[in-house]
Amino acid sequence: MASCMLIVCLAGLQLSCATSPDTPGLVLKGHQLVGKIWDVKQRAFIDKETLNTRSLESEYLLIGERHDNLVHHQHQTWFIQQLEKKPLQVSVAFEMIDNEQGVRLAKRQINSVEELISELNISKTSWEYEQRYKSLFAETLAAGYKINSANLNSKRLMQTVKKGELNLPVAYKRMLNKTGLSPEQNTALLQGINASHCNMLDDKTTSKMALAQRMRDSIMAHSLLKSGAQVKVLIAGIEHVRKDRGVPLYLQTNLQAQTKPVKILSIGLLEVELDMSDPLAYAEYWDDHTLPFDIVWFTPQVEREDACAELLKHFKPKS
């Protein structure tokens, strides 16, 4: 079940967890957990009203998705709609928008979702904005919220990571050093990356991908920290919003000098699994004894092709 982590950009590939540009088919729609919202700390289900209250009380609202699951985008749109009902300053940062796209967006007035997508599509990406994110973008624009980039251009990321951690630019070194992972966290990250790529990666590739993951988590956190809005929303892959080693950890280390606690809410939009009706059982997929989120909202699963079969075309399994 492990979510598709980083695309295998280090090998020059663009393998995502997508099925096709068409609307992916959903399975397990009748699963008893679908639509249920789980409070991880309280170990109890909550209703949408309670979730809405929690989100409105948060300064940092991090919503993790599977990129090709349109139900996840519908839920994200719902959050924007709820925020819109309150007189709040809100910014929305997207993993799907990189720094170069962000510079272009800042230079012009965007009046429609069509203009936004056209501007984003100047850069060649695999995000499929029209098919997946149009409604979410449209709602964000209609609310008058500022749209921010939360990612580093993939080519620049690849070039930087290939040099290795010791040769990173000073600014990136500083960001990562401020939020160091423990040996246990680093081992779990490496194991998770390799497992999500069907255990086909060699140690060198796995290490580079782990560095890229850490850099992107740090960059996403800093994109939120730069916003002066009352509520700072992040739309990103579910791995990035995990509390144990994702964006919330980088936020905490950068905000720890503040005199009052900062309210960070991490929400994982999590696909259900066949024959798994106990929310606690899902923790095993996250190399932990508990789900690494504040809230989990269970959704149907997208019917996907075999990702391992696709990877086999490009990698030889480790001996």
Image: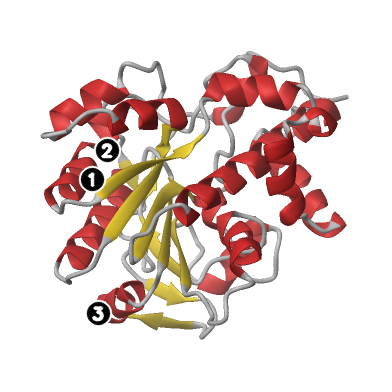
Q: Is residue 200 left or right of residue 260?
A: right
Disc 1 crowd, CA 10 A, few/some/many (<14, 14-19, 20+): many
Query: Which amino acid type corresponds to the residue marked 1 in the rendered image?
Result: Leu
- Answer with mark 1 or mark 3, whichever residue precedes in sequence: 3
Say which residue appears at 35% left-offset and 78% top-offset: 57
Q: CA distance from mark 1 to mark 3?
A: 21 Å
Query: Which amino acid type corresponds to the residue marked 2 in the rendered image?
Result: Tyr
Answer with the quarter of the image where residue 252 lies.
Answer: bottom right
Q: Mark 1 falls on what kind of element?
A: helix
Check whether the beta carbons of the residues at disc 2 and disc 1 lie within 8 A of each other: yes
In front of the other: 301 or 3: 3
Q: Is residue 314 left or right of residue 145?
A: right
In front of the other: 294 or 47: 294
Say which residue appears at 66% left-offset and 64% top-offset: 253
x and y, in percent, of residue 224 in the image: 46, 53
Q: CA distance from mark 2 to mark 3?
A: 25 Å
- Name the residue carrying label 2: 133
In front of the other: 72 or 158: 158
Q: CA distance from mark 2 to mark 1?
A: 5 Å
Q: Is residue 49 above or below residue 184?
A: below
- Name the residue carrying label 3: 49
Disc 2 crowd, CA 10 A, few/some/many (<14, 14-19, 20+): many
Q: Is residue 75 left or right of residue 152?
A: left
Check whether the beta carbons of the residues at disc 1 and disc 3 lie within 8 A of each other: no
Say which residue appears at 57% left-offset and 73% top-offset: 280
- Answer with mark 2 or mark 3, whichever residue precedes in sequence: 3
- Name the residue carrying label 1: 136
Q: Mark 3 falls on what kind of element?
A: helix
